[in-house]
Image (tube, rainbow, N blue to C red):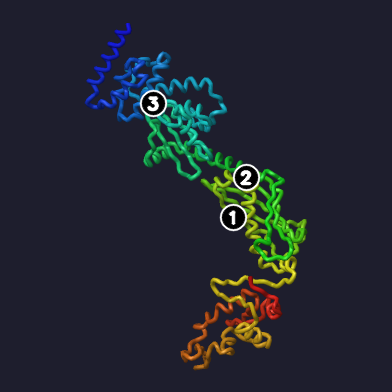
Amino acid sequence: MKLVNVLITEGRKEDLEKKYSKSLGKEVFNYIFNDPFMKKTNYKYGDFLLKNLSYPAKSEIDSAISLLKKFDKFSKNLEKKDINQYEDLSDLSIELSDYKSKNQSKRIDETETEKVYEDPNILIVRPLTHKSSCKYGAGTRWCTTDNDSTHYNRYTSGAQGLYYIILKKFDQSNKFYKIAIHKSPSGEDEWYDAQDKLFSDREKEVFNLGAPKIIQTIDKHYDKLLEKKVGNLLNNVFDDNNASASFNVSTDLKVDVPVFVVFRWPGTLDENHYNVMMDLVVNGEIVDRYLLYILVSFKYDFITMNIELDGDDSITPKIDNDLSGKSVFIKFGTEFFKSKSQKDGFRAIMNSVYSLFIRELKHDNKFRELTLKDPKKVWTPNRTSYGYTFKQNKGLIKQLVDSLNSGKKMTKLDFLVDNGKLDTKVENGKTLYSTPGTNMFRPSSDFRGHFSAFFNSAVLAGIIAYDKEGQKYYIKKGPNFEDFVRGELTSL
């Protein structure tokens, strides 16, 4: 009997080599003939394998032999039990996938699949496990139905969405009888037919025109899924009522006493809506308090927050600035919260509000009285555009101060003429101006911007202001005029 088997085996090898040697080459034959499975089965699958190799690479040969091993194992249970009943390797793969799916469907739990939509013609599911993916993707060539769950995990991890559309009235001969749609937070969708070929733009357009409800249903479902997943990330940040974040103001502002901005008592109001309390604590005393209302929205891979500040009537503010009604808009990538602890995520959000608050405190004179031993009124120069800081009452600013103290009524041009910065003359009843030494007299409109950086800075510092009378603007003392004269106004 052994001799008969040897003769059959050698005969098959010889026949196969004659039949396919010209097209495949000796190296391919040696690789196949030396495979343990091919030897064990006396090369009975050799003809089917060799005639269906589209490209004789080792990886393809290994994949095909792996498929034949499954057939050899399950062929008794299949409808087509003879290997030659199959058209090609793809046909065999579909048959084995169907068999695997039928077996798995008996064991699969209902919680492993989310049924998104169903009617007599269409079924839309979201497979929640690899088993479910194999069941509903049976008969396709999708990598998400492979024995190995690697590809399934790659397409479903994080905030991705994987949906299978099954057109019940189509049979397997139609490549659109099953469609896979992969959705990602970036907003890029990938559509695959049953042969695992990407849809062209034209195919997508036709499908959308023919069945808009299907795509709308999936889009709506995915948007809710994304909101829920990202919402879970934020719930982790805001659900701990004992969470807090404290910022030491002395790191950003000059103060002589301990000053902290403290955020605490976070809570969830409803879906995507949170609140937090913010206190300004000076020397151990709460001197101002706000309630923060945080509204969250999601778009693709980003979380956008609108944080609105509302004053708390339970505390009488001891500073000037009122931030009630002001808002802060911030944006984070969803990956940021996945990589952060609850504490770090909470602090990162509150840091944006703290930055706004600090900018306002810089200009708050009551705050400076509370926190400095020698408080002075402050102002912030526009160094980029103007450059004036008025650190001392001398030069041109002193001349302006002296003129205002003298009670003289004057416009900017009057002041510049009085101090030798412009020459003037009257011609035909009109006053003309010229820069000294040029003798080029022109109307006042040509000098509206003369020394504008100086005057604009003086207004910004609060040293001067203007009164309008008719078409003219007269200089007057500003709200910080006396503080500047006393040396109690300083620039930041």
Tell me the element at label 1: strand
Mark yes or no: residue 121 visible. Answer: no
Image coordinates of residue 428 in percent, x first then y, are 50, 93
C-alpha separation, residue under disc 3 versus residue under disc 2: 49 Å
Mark 2, Cα crowd under 10 Å, few <14 / some 14-19 / many 20+, is few
Q: Quadrant of residue 3?
A: top left
Residue indicated by mark 1: 329
Q: Residue at x 65, y 62 (%)?
A: 252
Q: Residue at x 65, y 55 (%)?
A: 308
Q: Earlier in the sequence, mark 1 or mark 2?
A: 1
Q: Which quadrant does the C terminus fall into?
A: bottom right
Q: Residue at x 64, y 56 (%)?
A: 353
Tell me the element at label 2: loop
Image side of residue 246 versus residue 419, left or right: right
Image coordinates of residue 222 in percent, x first then y, are 52, 39
Looking at the rendered structure, the kind of residue marked 3 is: Gln
Looking at the rendered structure, the kind of residue marked 2 is: Ser
Say the numbered circle drawn on residue 410.
Answer: none
190 or 333, which is in the foreground? Answer: 333
Image side of residue 55 versus residue 306, left or right: left
Residue indicated by mark 3: 172
C-alpha separation, residue under disc 1 versus residue under disc 2: 22 Å
C-alpha separation, residue under disc 3 versus residue under disc 1: 51 Å
